[in-house]
Amino acid sequence: MTGAETINGKAIKGQPVCGVVAVAHVTGRDPEKVFKGFKKTLKMADNWRGGTYTWQVKQMLDQYRYKYEVSTEGRGTLAKWVEWYAMPGVSYIVQSGYHWQAVRDGIVTDQTGSHPIADYWGRRKHFKKAIKILTNRGTRKKSEVKK
């Protein structure tokens, strides 16, 4: 994230779009397009602001043809989970508290940007579950590829 991204004409930072941003980050897609994808695929109301549940994140990963596995293995804080359980070179979408973030190689990304876990504002949130991204099962449509 460059910090300049918007969703619905508003800056991403400060909006409740953590699940949307996490999916966008691990799939390499534009957050605005992923937000619109959530609305269309999941038939969200026009006033939906971006809050997501696990089943919705999984459904969007299915929509984007990603293979994944969900794990609740681990306990303690997000920082401890990253230290003890996260494997190098593997991308995860992690839920801690009621917040989603993308994690890879000790770097955490959410709507506030990308940060090393030691500097991340939510490092002390309680770990709930991780969605480990295994592979991309297919290719993107030509219209989805960034130019």
Image (cartoon, rainbow, N blue to C red):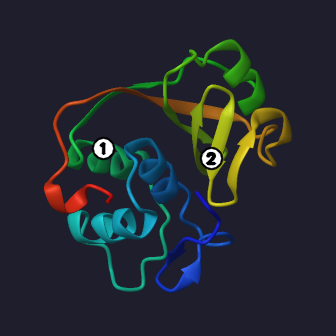
Q: Is residue 65 left or right of residue 17?
A: left
- In the depicted structure, whether residue 98 falls above or below residue 139: below
Outermost front residue: 147
Residue 136 spot, x, y in % from top left: 26, 32
Give me the residue at 43% from left, 53% from top.
Answer: 24
Q: Tell whether label 1 touches label 2 (CB within 8 Å).
A: no
Give me the residue at 19% from left, 48% from top.
Answer: 140
Give me the residue at 77% from left, 45% from top.
Answer: 122
- In the depicted structure, whether residue 94 falls above or below residue 11: above
- For marks 2 and 1, the one nearer the N-term is 1
User: Which residue matches tag 1?
Assistant: 61
Q: Quadrant of residue 32?
A: bottom left
Q: Nearer the viewer, mark 2 or mark 1?
A: 2
Give me the residue at 34% from left, 67% from top.
Answer: 33
Q: Is residue 141 left or right of residue 103?
A: left
Q: Quadrant of residue 144?
A: bottom left
- Pick the residue in front: 131 or 87: 87
Q: Could you tell me how far apart the alpha carbons at marks 2 and 1 are, in whole angstroms?
A: 17 Å
Marks counted in the figure total 2
Q: Which mark is residue 109?
A: 2
